[in-house]
Amino acid sequence: MKVTANPASQQQPSFFTNLRHKLPRDTGIFIVMVGIALIFEMAGWYVRDQSFLMNTNRLILILLQVAIIGIIAVGVTQVIITTGIDLSSGSVIALTAVVAASLAQTSDSLSPMFPSLVNMPAAIPIGAGIGVGLLCGLVNGVLITRTGIPPFIATLGMMVSARGLAQYYTQGNPISFLSDSFTSIGQGAMPVIIFLVVAFLFHIALKHTRYGKYVYAIGGNMTSAKVSGINVNKYLIIVYTIAGALSGLAGVVLAARVSSGQSSMGMAYELDAIAAAVIGGSSLMGGVGRITGTLIGAVILGLIKSGFTFIGVDAYIQDIIKGIIIVAAVSIDMHRNRKKR
């Protein structure tokens, strides 16, 4: 006798399950961000008897810190979605910053790097900086796709080389006396505006264009993507080139913000960018990641750094805690992927 299940007896989705599916995907990480902000607010009143959030200068500083890391993280997110990694972005920032600064010097400089190229229009150093970053990303992409070198090794080599080039280019000396037209892109709210525009453009690109569909397909299953006719190597090169160009843009904005170009710029920025992407929900297994999540992840890192400084936590302890947070985020991602499988 055949027994059929009674539909009424089947387990129905709970209210909370339905609610979770209706809420935006990044609601969870947004709640975490709000929770962290409130924790530092309470700690501020307890430790220093003052507000953490109700301080305009502090919030502006957090946004400015987030902007530079966020610009890099937008590119890194796309790399991670394809199951790749980019360790070179911090060093590329240094290289692009010194190149842009060397072309943005004024005639007031005591020892300009290029005496015949002073007082240049701002578009030239900006374009040169972004172009150098784009070239570095292109080299990464070509190495990975044409030689089969793992992304970790290829970008590690670029990380060392770009930093070395920046040091050789400047001979260890800072480059200063930059034009006002160039430094204007790093002043006030401009870095934040640039970050938000970049984030918006690539959010649209990933969500609503063929480029985004192919990037997710490559990260989801590279073999299937090849079988379905996607030119995987072409799109990987594009992804790494975009990541390099965004690192170049971040380097230009950073040089403009501090009115100087130095080979020591961007130290460990690549780790913060990767952390922002992973905390924001990007999976190191590939195929999963959103720009909105990365944006929130970058804000979380900014809150943590500023909050710990506010309540007087030692800088070395901050690095330890940041490392624990990164490991925890990756562990959660690994656990989530095991459950899916």
Image (cartoon, helix red, strand yellow):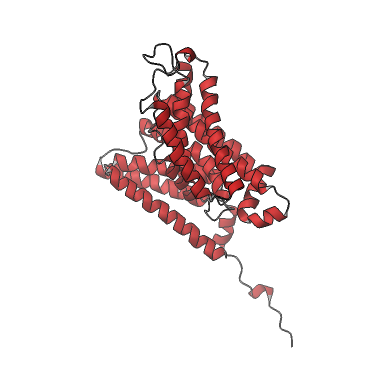
> How many numbered tags mark residues here?
0
208 left or right of 277? right
Q: Nearer the viewer, residue 74 or 22?
A: 74
Where residue 305 sits, quadrant-wise, is top left
Quarter of the image that includes the N terminus: bottom right
Quarter of the image that includes the C terminus: bottom right
- Could you tell me which residue is drawn at 39 percent across and 20 percent down? 176
Where residue 268 sits, quadrant-wise, is top left
Could you tell me if residue 63 is visible in this image? Answer: no
- Could you tell me which residue is drawn at 36 percent across and 30 percent down? 57
Residue 253 lies, in percent from the top left, at: 47, 28
Residue 93 lies, in percent from the top left, at: 46, 34
Residue farthest along the top direction in this orientation = 107
Residue farthest along the bottom direction in this orientation = 1
Residue 53 lies, in percent from the top left, at: 37, 38
96 left or right of 148? left
Q: Above or below — where is 109 with respect to 28?
A: above
